[in-house]
């Protein structure tokens, strides 16, 4: 199928409005109660195997996690009958990994809002 058969990515349409919630290590991570820090988007359209929308979130208690959905060759893919398909997921990450993700996907003001920044 050609790319013309799929809707092009549109930030308003793919914004992380999906509710994803998981309990990991006795802690609840929930996209509806956490603050979205920034979003990584890739791929041309939702049917693209490389399509991905992943958000960095901070919980009310200050813990960071990634949550999102993707195509078959991206972060949130899942195995199905010897192959892969798109999926969604949630993964807690540490402060350093969260800062690295933000530095790659957010503007400087957002990075400075959530992380300590020093003069070089």
Image (cartoon, rainbow, N blue to C red):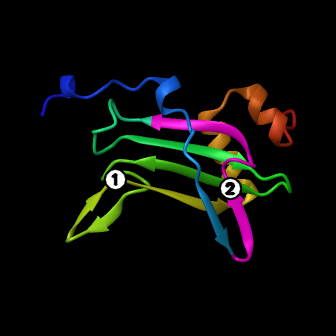
Asked if the stretch drawn in magenta spans residue 37, the answer is yes
Real-space Cα separation, disc 1 to disc 2, in angstroms? 21 Å
Q: Residue 47 is drawn in which quadrant?
A: top left
Horizontal and vertical percent for residue 16?
56, 39
Which of pointers 1 and 2 indicates the residue nearer the eye? 2
Check the image and report above or below for 47 versus 82. above
Q: Are marks 1 and 2 in contact (CB under 8 Å)?
A: no
Q: Residues within 10 Å of mark 2 (few under 14, many from 20)?
A: some
Label 1 belongs to which residue? 86
What residue is rendered at 78% in x and 58% in y? Answer: 63
Q: Position of residue 83 (x, y in %)?
A: 21, 65
Query: Which residues fall within the magenta stretch?
Result: 25-41
Q: Residue at horizontal 42%, vertical 36%?
A: 42
Residue 18, picture quadrant: top right
Residue at 48 percent across and 35 percent down: it is 41
Q: Is residue 30 left or right of residue 7?
A: right
Picture quarter containing residue 77?
bottom left
Percent from the top left, x then y, of residue 114?
81, 40
Quarter placement of the N terminus? top left
**Mark 2 = which residue?**
30
Residue 62 in the magenta stretch? The answer is no
Q: Is residue 80 left or right of residue 113?
A: left
The quadrant the C terminus occupies is top right
Magenta span: helix, strand or loop, mainly?
A: strand
Describe residue 84's horizontal placement relative to residue 43 as left or right: left
- Which residue ends up furthest to the left in the rendered image? 1
Residue drawn at (43%, 54%), measured in percent from left and top? 75
């Amino acid at each position: 199928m050609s790319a013309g058969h799929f809707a092009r990515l549109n930030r308003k349409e793919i914004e992380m409005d999906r509710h994803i919630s998981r309990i990991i290590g006795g802690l609840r991570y929930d996209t509806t109660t956490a603050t979205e820090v920034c979003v990584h988007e890739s791929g041309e359209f939702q049917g693209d195997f490389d399509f991905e929308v992943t958000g960095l979130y901070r919980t009310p208690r200050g813990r960071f996690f990634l949550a999102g959905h993707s195509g078959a060759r991206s972060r949130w893919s899942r195995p199905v009958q010897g192959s892969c398909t798109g999926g969604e997921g949630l993964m807690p990450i540490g402060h350093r990994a969260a800062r690295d993700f933000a530095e790659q996907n957010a503007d400087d003001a957002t990075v400075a809002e959530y992380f300590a920044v020093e003069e070089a």
